[in-house]
Image (spheres, rainbow, N blue to C red):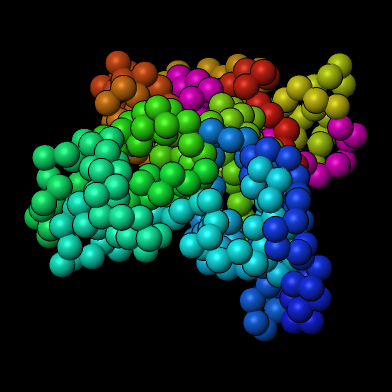
Amino acid sequence: MSTTPASQATAGAASAAPVGSSGGGSGLHLDGVYRVFPGGVVAVEDVNLHIANGEYVVFLGPSGCGKTTTLRMIGGHDEPSQGTISLDGEILNGVTPAKRPVTTVFQHFALFPHRNVLQNVAFGLKMRGIGKVEREKQARDAIDLVGLGQMANRKPRELSSGQQQRVALSRVLVTRPKAILLDEPFGDLDRLLQLRMRVELRALQRDLGITFIHVTHNQEEALSMADRIVVMDDGRLQQVGTPTDLARHPKNVFVAKFMGDNNTIRGPVVESRDGVVTVQGKLLRGAVRGDLPVGQETAMTIRASAVQVSTSPEAAAVNAGRARLNFAEYLGDSVKLHLDVQGEPFLAKVDEARYAEIRAFEGQDVTVSWNLEDGQLLEL
């Protein structure tokens, strides 16, 4: 997080649009949003983003990057210091969480332990003054929607973590929000249950057609669930795109490294001709399609799955070098190779059929290479 004079926070808050006024069009809009904490710490800086109605968007980034603060501002639990948040044309700045057409599902569920499932789900309707018969009918419908109809009379302690999460979700669904906000929704679940809940939650979102905004630090989770991923670091948006965009075409060095299984070569351009530039890293050189002047500092990335590995000492003329194989990690359908080039880490992935062959070379040198088309220039 960066810091800024504390006076900017006060000035920014004064610039927010009046509550209830119009802003943006359909969907959720964040326009020039900042969040500055006391002491001048900037948690979120100049976020501009549009989320379409019915979209499943995942905010992804390391701890402290600003993703949860952004979610809290959308939900009304934090106010922007500057900028506006609007949904379907209505400004949400200054609107309390209870009066916003969005609801948050927190990581720890926050169920009432002394109330049964039906009572937990119906509680929000009770607070809105809906009569007992109608609220119980709506609550049962919401419970049925998440497959817990037979457990309406059980207390939270009698449910598994996955079932408790479904109760928390149905308690949100019963209020019929325009958007559901999920803060690390799988953080308390074991891996097998996480995998199952990913499928169930994504299927439910598609059936309902409601906007889901999901915060996580887990790259695999984001790639498997999102229509679009918003990558954040140091309070700023680093890249917004589809899972394929983020996996295959990272925009900058941070995104390439954070998304995992990407190798980067950083250094000056030492050759540039015929639409191909060659970058001289500290220990490894790489060529990639592009057009940059000689001497410019730049970086390139190569996905681990695009790296070819040969146990032969013969190397191709372009994009090839020798690397020490430290460890072959068997992943079931592939093998991840942890290599180093004179002390610099390097990754490759090969088909699982090569596991026995490759493992025999642990501790020895192998040849790594890749095609021109598999490299990509990055922003520094």
Q: Residue at x 31, y 22 (%)?
A: 333
Relative horizontal placement of residue 298, taking residue 118 as reference (left or right): right
Outermost residue toward the right?
A: 293
Please state the horizontal and vertical placement of residue 147, each as a whole percent of the image. Answer: 21, 36
Between 227 and 89, the one nearer to me in the picture: 89
Q: Position of residue 42 (x, y in %)?
A: 68, 70
Residue 23 in view here: yes
- Give the percent coordinates (x, y) of residue 343: 52, 48
Q: Who is closer to the viewer here, 169 or 342?
A: 169
With respect to residue 302, does 148 lie above or below?
below
The quarter of the displayed image where residue 327 is located: top left
Q: Nearer the viewer, residue 375 or 189?
A: 189
Q: Which stretch is magenta?
A: 292-310
User: What residue do we see at 65% from left, 67% from top?
Assistant: 94
In the rendered view, does 282 fall on the left or right side of 99? right
**Magenta stretch containing residue 75, yes or no?**
no
Is residue 106 visible in this depiction of the protein?
A: no
